[in-house]
């Protein structure tokens, strides 16, 4: 390869040399500025339109440079002008099943290829036969099922080892590369080719990856794939790395079984230096060309001795047996006892939570180092907690699960360190964290070392708050300090009869206060779901509970820098809610169930209510509108007439803060007669605690749309996301009554003297109520003064909400710079 700087107009001329695999590293020649128009003219209209879509000039420059570089590499090897390299699609070369974007063309025609702005792949054979292939193209499941039989048996085995969700992508990598490579080389040589699979290890260019080609002439060398990638840490630089190779039988790198006969030179010019790697070349072994395990030799390593194979196989067998033992648990009887309590084991829970086959365990071999109290003779692997990551509907989720079969799931030093590590990994990866809790608190035998472990968990819970979703699933006891961690997370799930949470257990309560109470009565699922408000969701069994955890995760973004996943429902955007006219009585004194209204408005009538049994006078729920996740806050006239009280205010405030933290737009449905009056409410802090909801709304920067259905009185109207505290769109139904108070109460205050002096006070009262209603509480009063944006037909509410949220999708409403606010507590 030619050294020296890359000229500004593009790529320096290259001359392929038989027996060498070339890796081209191309520097973007226009740092900090747009490329010359003449150079951009080499691209087609589709590429130029895609480039223009980038907002940041740096992204646009890298995209253009990547496309131009790839076009010139292909054009050089084809002997055509760069502009003749064009986009396209191609079917399966064998059965014509459509695979999406993979591309193969012979040497007599320009190749078709696809390229994202961050990665493009081109194959360049030494025989000057180029092939373009996009490994990002994911075929349909039908195409995968149809064309898998075309793969080599070893390739099919590799594919079968992948999780089901990864198989389409894995198939695309295997199929498009092999078929593209073989057809490209075969067309250049004028005949078909056969190949054996070496493996898919392109993450490490120093190991064999790709296919061993039979009967390929020695002077043809082998083909090297070339990828262009943009790197954020190399501004203005396009790095090129090999992503897979086809090896000739007499030029196969790193295949064990024969003495080296020479050296195959891989030349690479980098942005700052030039290096040459020498890889030993070995003949094709007499055995199967697919080499794995001991057959793979790293660059510069000595050939394996005859005895090394049995030794490594023995160690692998030992490792396999050990991990099987760990996965099986400490004792079958312990598993039986767990099942007898109606509880699953920790591993069974993880399997139910995550996509099948996706779990990767971390520190399965970890053991505690404590001595004393007999612990030195009891050192089980995992130390009572299973940690790792997997996927839920294809998205990464981190998890830790206490294993009650080991030390009762009690937390020790090593146990805590494992949890700290997985929490740190979740924060760094920007992925949700789920804890499956079933433990007896701190491991008393380890003393304060165990207790300090909780501090590290609490600190990380707080650090992750508002950064990644944190879900706590209570599947057994959680006592003492351990109970504080779930309280610091975003959502708590509990299972009836088997899960309990409390700071001091029933025995301590009886000893101190004389009160007798059961564990479930003190801290069971229904207690925390309906009385304390600690639990957001309560279920009858673990299977249902974990299924609901998966569903909740499907509604949440992975972190605070992402939007929630959009999933289009079956309902049309403009679906009219005729049923709403019957569901909501025009008479403000009649009750109705707000959940029925929500069902009519959201996609497919499906929503997930939070705190369904606590503070029931306010409904908080997650749902979708036109596929977009929204948070719904609504007064519930069917419970306490929908008034706001202490519990409802705290419930709404935390939900609003959560939605704002994770970019979930807010929809507020208002039908509120005011704050609940009463001595208890005042003494328990309705002012301070009611202000929490006000603070949460005022602080929220996500899109906010409010709809007044009927009553909206006094301070409660203001708090329920009125226009005056920052609602982006304020709407009302024609049944609305937006006022300081109801007409009856207002007339009694404003016209008190006139009513008292009247000969017929009741008739005068009725007259003044009608007068006040006509003047100040009619449906269009607020709209006339700009306090609501529009009075809408209730049947159009869904369509108006969807249009409003679409308009607000790019909302940017920052807050003043501050360390953090000081909300009422």
Image (spheres, rainbow, N blue to C red):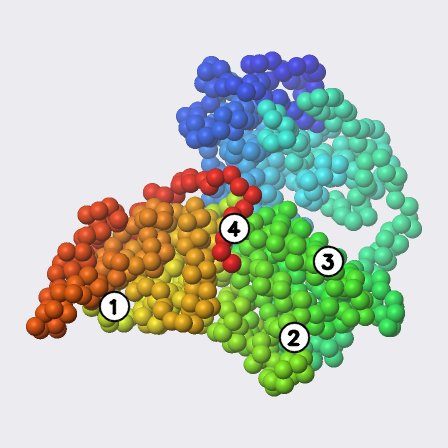
Pointer 1: what residue? 583
Mark 3 to mark 2: distance in Å?
A: 26 Å
Pointer 2: what residue? 504
For the residue pair 655 and 549, the one nearer the viewer reads as 655
Which image quarter: residue 389? bottom right
Mark toward the start of the polypeptide (3 vs 1)? 3
User: For numbered disc 3, what is the local secondary structure?
Assistant: helix
Mark 2 or mark 1, whichever is nearer to me: 2
Which image quarter: residue 10? top right
Mark 1 to mark 4: distance in Å?
A: 41 Å
* 307 in relation to 190, above or below: below
* 735 in relation to 185, above or below: below
| Badge 2 density bin: few <14, some 14–19, many ≥20, Cα 10 Å | few
Q: Confirm whether residue 164 shows in the render.
A: no
Mark 1 near mark 4, Cβ–Cβ under 8 Å? no
* Quadrant (top left, top right, bottom left, bottom right) of the N terminus: top right
Pointer 4: what residue? 822
Q: Position of residue 488 (x, y in %)?
A: 59, 60
Pointer 3: what residue? 418
Which image quarter: residue 390? bottom right
Q: Position of residue 674 (x, y in %)?
A: 32, 64
For the residue pair 171 and 449, the one nearer the viewer reads as 449
Mark 1 or mark 4, whichever is nearer to me: 4
Mark 2 or mark 4, whichever is nearer to me: 4
Mark 3 near mark 1, Cβ–Cβ under 8 Å? no
Residue positioned 73% across, 68% down in the render? 442
């Amino acid at each position: 390869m030619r050294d020296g700087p890359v000229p500004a107009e593009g790529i320096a001329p290259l001359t392929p040399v038989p027996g060498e695999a070339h890796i081209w590293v191309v520097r973007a020649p226009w740092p900090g500025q747009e490329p010359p128009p003449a150079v951009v003219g080499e691209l087609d209209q589709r590429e130029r339109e895609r480039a223009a879509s980038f907002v940041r000039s740096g992204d646009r420059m890298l995209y253009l440079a990547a496309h131009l570089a790839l076009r010139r590499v292909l054009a050089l090897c084809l002997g055509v002008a760069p502009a003749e390299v064009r986009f396209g699609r191609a079917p399966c070369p064998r059965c014509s099943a459509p695979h999406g974007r993979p591309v193969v063309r012979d040497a007599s025609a320009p190749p078709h290829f696809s390229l994202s702005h961050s990665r493009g792949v081109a194959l360049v054979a030494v025989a000057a036969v180029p092939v373009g292939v996009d490994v990002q193209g994911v075929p349909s499941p039908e195409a995968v099922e149809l064309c898998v039989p075309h793969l080599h048996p070893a390739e099919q085995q590799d594919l079968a080892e992948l999780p089901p969700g990864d198989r389409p992508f894995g198939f695309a990598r295997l199929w498009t590369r092999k078929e593209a490579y073989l057809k490209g080389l075969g067309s250049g040589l004028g005949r078909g080719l056969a190949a054996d699979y070496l493996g898919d290890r392109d993450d490490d260019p120093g190991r064999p990856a790709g296919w061993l080609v039979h009967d390929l002439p020695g002077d043809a060398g082998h083909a090297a794939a070339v990828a262009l990638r943009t790197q954020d840490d190399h501004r203005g630089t396009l790095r090129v790395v090999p992503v897979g190779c086809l090896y000739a039988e007499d030029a196969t790198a790193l295949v064990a079984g024969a003495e080296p006969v020479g050296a195959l030179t891989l030349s690479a010019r980098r942005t700052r230096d030039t290096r040459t790697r020498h890889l030993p070349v070995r003949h094709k072994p007499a055995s199967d060309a697919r080499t794995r395990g001991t057959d793979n030799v790293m660059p510069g390593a000595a050939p394996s001795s005859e005895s090394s194979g049995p030794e490594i196989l023995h160690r692998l067998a030992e490792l396999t047996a050990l991990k099987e033992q760990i996965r099986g648990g400490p004792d079958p009887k312990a598993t039986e006892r767990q099942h007898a309590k109606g509880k699953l084991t920790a591993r069974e829970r993880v399997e139910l939570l995550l996509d099948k086959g996706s779990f990767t365990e971390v520190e399965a071999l970890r053991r505690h180092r404590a001595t004393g109290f007999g612990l030195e003779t009891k050192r089980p692997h995992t130390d009572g907690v299973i940690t790792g990551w997997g996927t839920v509907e294809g998205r990464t989720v981190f998890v830790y699960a206490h294993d009650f079969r080991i030390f009762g799931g009690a937390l020790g030093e090593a146990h805590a360190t494992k949890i700290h590590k997985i929490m740190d990994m979740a924060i760094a990866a920007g992925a949700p964290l789920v804890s499956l809790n079933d433990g007896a608190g701190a491991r008393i035998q380890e003393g304060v070392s165990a207790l300090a472990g909780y501090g590290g968990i609490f600190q990380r819970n707080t650090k992750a708050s508002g950064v990644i979703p944190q879900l706590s699933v209570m599947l057994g006891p959680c006592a003492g300090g351990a109970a504080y961690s779930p309280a610091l997370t975003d959502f708590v799930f509990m299972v009836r009869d088997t899960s309990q949470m409390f700071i001091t257990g029933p025995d301590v309560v009886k000893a101190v206060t004389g009160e007798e109470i059961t564990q479930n009565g003190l801290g069971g699922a229904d207690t925390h779901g309906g009385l304390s408000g600690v639990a957001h969701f309560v279920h009858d069994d673990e299977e249902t509970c974990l299924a609901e955890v998966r569903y909740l995760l499907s509604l949440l973004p992975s972190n605070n820098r992402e939007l929630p996943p959009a999933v289009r429902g079956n309902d049309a955007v403009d679906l009219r809610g005729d049923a709403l006219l019957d569901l909501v009585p025009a008479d403000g004194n009649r009750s109705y169930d707000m959940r029925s209204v929500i069902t009519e408005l959201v996609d497919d009538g499906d929503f997930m209510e939070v705190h369904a049994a606590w503070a029931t006078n306010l409904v908080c729920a997650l749902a979708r509108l036109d596929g977009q996740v929204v948070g719904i806050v609504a007064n519930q006239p069917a419970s306490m007439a929908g008034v706001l009280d202490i519990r409802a205010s705290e419930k709404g405030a935390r939900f609003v803060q959560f939605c704002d933290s994770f970019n979930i737009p807010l929809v507020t449905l208002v039908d509120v007669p005011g704050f609940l009056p009463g001595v208890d409410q005042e003494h328990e802090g309705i002012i301070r605690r009611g202000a929490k909801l006000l603070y949460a709304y005022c602080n929220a920067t996500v899109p906010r749309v409010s709809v007044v259905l009927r009553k909206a009185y006094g301070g409660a109207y203001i708090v329920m996301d009125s226009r005056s505290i920052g609602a982006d769109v304020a709407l009302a139904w024609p049944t609305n009554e937006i006022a300081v108070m109801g007409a009856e109460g207002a007339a009694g205050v404003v016209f008190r003297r006139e009513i008292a002096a009247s000969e017929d006070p009741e008739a005068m009262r009725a007259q003044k109520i009608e007068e006040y209603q006509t003047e100040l509480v009619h449906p269009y009063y607020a709209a006339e003064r700009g306090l609501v944006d529009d009075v809408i037909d209730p049947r159009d509410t869904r369509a108006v909400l969807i249009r409003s949220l679409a308009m607000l999708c790019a909302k940017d409403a920052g807050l003043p710079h501050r360390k953090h606010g000081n909300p009422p507590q």
